Image: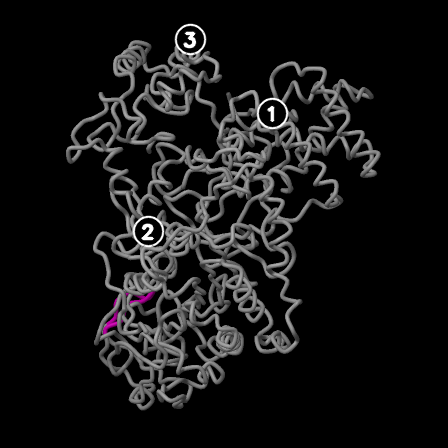
Amino acid sequence: MANRIWQYHFGRGIVRTSNDFGRFGELPTHRELLDWLASEFIAGGSSMKQLHRVIVHSSAYRMSSAATEQGLARDPVNDLFWRFDPRRLSAEELRDSVLAVNGTLNLELGGPGVYPPMPEEVLATSSRPDEAWGESSPEDAARRSAFIHVKRSLLHPLLVSFDLADTDSSCPVRFVTTQPTQALTLLNSDFSQSEAARFADRLERERPGDRRAQVARALELVRQRDPSPPMIERQLRFIRELEEQEGLTPRKALETFCLVAINLNEFIHLD
Amino acid sequence: MIPENLQPEDLPPHDRRGFCGRTRREFLWDAGAGFASVALGGLLGNSFFSEQALAADGVTPFRNPLAAKPPMFAPRAKSVIFLFMYGGPSQVDTFDYKPKLYALDGKTIDVKTFGRGGHRNKGRVVGPKWKFQQYGQCGKWVSDLFPNLATQVDDIAFIHSMTADSPLHGSAMLMMNSGRILSGHPCLGSWVNYGLGSMNENLPGFVVMLDPSGGPISGAKNWSSGYMPASYQGVVLRGEGPPILDLARPEGMTETTQRRLLDHLRSENEAHAGLRGGNPDLLSRIASYELAYQMQVYAPEAVDWESESEETQSLYGLDVDRTRDFGRKCLLARRLVERGVRFIQLYSGGNHNDHNWDAHGDLVLNHEKHAGDTDLPITGLLRDLKRRGLLDETLVVWGGEFGRQPTAEYEKGTGRDHNSYGFTMWMAGGGVKGGVSVGETDELGAEAVTHRLHVRNLHATILQRMGLDPNHMTYFFNGLDQKLVGVEGAEPIWQVMA
């Protein structure tokens, strides 16, 4: 358990093969640390929250992801945790993050699974297209991805595209692939379009009438830090070009900028 | 799973321990020295794209998991078109001629059967409902269900002694597609792409086209990549509208707007990556947007069947209502083959009951419909492939997940229950002999008796013709070198090979 919780924070377990501590598995990179975490976990009455706290308070967790030449030369695979391993968000994290930045994420816990809209093209792959998927209210459909109903023969394409675990067997470590279809999904899907529009709604609501403040707010939300003035300028220029050269309405230009914002590597990758 | 970006020489000395005298990592690397290095690629997860470098011109080369890979030996076929007759066509009414069965019509006889109705020892014979005639130089007997296809028998190898493990649709479908009756295993198309990659990175390497009535039972499980990465799963292609999900630009977004968006995104992402020492994951994501853009241009062209001549369209039956849908799929399959797609699967039949070949009620009604909808298109496909010189390198496979019993399922009517004890499939092109028939069922057509073959043998044959050794192409998962043909392995059907 200690190894898995560590894995979810760091992207890899202290034992990298978290389903296999045996002969076919990898050796722990920090055996004493793992023993200590396990003992702490037991001593804390098996409280996962307690263990999360211990881990995220550690200096290892708070390490920058910046690499040094010396570090890369001596420990390229970061066995020693000399830096934080940058990683792409998992499928669920990505969807939840989009909903979080546009302000629609519903954090309600528990209850039966929910049914975010399923594209018609995907429903058509079911042997009973009309009865294949349920319908949830917009509020329910915006709940965390963990609460999405899992139907093994009809998985949500957004999640599948970003390497959702296979639903048939235990998955100790997810694949992290980079594929053009992921770009197509994040650029063109109904999900991206409608969530980008909701993002624009939020900006107009929170910073009415002030384009610069809207852009700054958007960047602050997707990057979790204050944007630099030149970065804001670049976005404003982009929006202006969309309006002046592409003939987009101010609203449509803002939505298009929001679409860019949720496609930024800085948003999709954690470091 | 294996961590990122690892070379054996990267291993610290403390990691050296006994696994056949080597570390597990070394073991995998050694095992992967030749072809199977491909296998390792699949295991590396994170580092899938880490080997990329930024080229001098600043354009990031994109190392697609579907990039072409060398076969294990000289292939006889470059692509597979699998014509999946979902529901299970009846062998004795199509290609497995059983003259004695006609006279037994209506008689109750002793015969062991196993279908959805369970195990039975007796049954009322339903005589074949169509006449058979001999065709071609090989004199193959074909029923009147396929008047067009019958003219192609000299190019076809029939396999009459197929057997499968399950007589139920769900599990039998999984078996025909992935070699197992349980889900979670990669499909044949995934294995082919994992082994060979695609010859065209602008298109998916494993394409599935479904029936208008819906997908087969268990839907996406039938084109899943199981424990392999999602790059190897089948992509559902639609004959009308945007061919691939999310391929089309959103409504109201012009090409120039999108180009501007992508340029802006790219410059922001490059600025971000620049501060991060050229992290390869970030660079490959930047590159993936450009490839996505190319796909948007390329894929619609690939499926533009309307650009084909009128003569070609009518060859596939596009000018007749009932054959238009399957004809279009067959035509698209040829266009995809021409563009280097490795594995194309076409479904005849979808949904449930009489929407597919599952003739439990009225055999004549059911099979007339499905054979009638596909006979001309399949014939057109074979003819067109042949005249374009593509048949030699394209392996066409026809069949369902099982066959049907010679006896009736119910007290009344002509419906036949499922039969996995013996059924017929055929192959054509791609290094397969024409005008041959392999294996036999008993005189009722109930069970394979000579040269019994399993779905695994069929899979082995397809892999072999594609230049992959079915018994040596492996993927390490769950502590085991997994194979499509299972740990048991399977011989290809050498008798059908040219």
Instruction: Specify the quadrant of the image occupied by residue A49.
Output: top left
Position of residue A129 measured from the top left corner of the image (x, y, whole percent): 55, 55
Position of residue A176 measured from the top left corner of the image (x, y, whole percent): 45, 35
**Over which residues does the magenta segment extend?**
B112-120
Same chain letter for marks 3 and 1: yes
Q: Is the magenta stretch mostly helix, strand or loop?
A: strand
Instruction: Specify the quadrant of the image occupied by residue B300.
Output: bottom right
Chain bearing mark 1: A
Q: Above or below — where is B99 with respect to A106?
A: below
Mark pair 2, 3: CA separation: 45 Å
Amino acid type indicated by mark 1: Ala
Q: Is residue B305 magenta?
A: no
Identified at 60% across, 38% down, the residue is: A186
B131 and B228: which is toward the camera? B228
Q: What element carries label 2?
A: loop
Of labels 2 and 3, the one closer to you? 3
Q: Above or below — where is B341 with respect to B29?
A: below
- Judging from the image, the colouring scheme is one colour
B370 and B235: which is toward the camera? B235
Question: Which residue is under mark 1?
Answer: A100
Q: Earlier in the sequence, mark 3 or mark 1?
A: 3
Mark pair 2, 1: CA separation: 38 Å
Residue B437 is left or right of residue B220, and the answer is: left
Identified at 34% across, 20% down, the residue is: A79
Which labelled disc corresponds to residue A59?
3
Q: Name the quadrant of the N terminus of chain A.
A: top left
Residue B370, can we see it?
no
Labels 2 and 3 touching (C-beta < 8 A): no
Question: Which residue is under mark 2?
Answer: B182
Same chain letter for marks 2 and 3: no
Amino acid type indicated by mark 3: Ser
Q: Is mark 3 on a helix, strand or loop?
A: loop
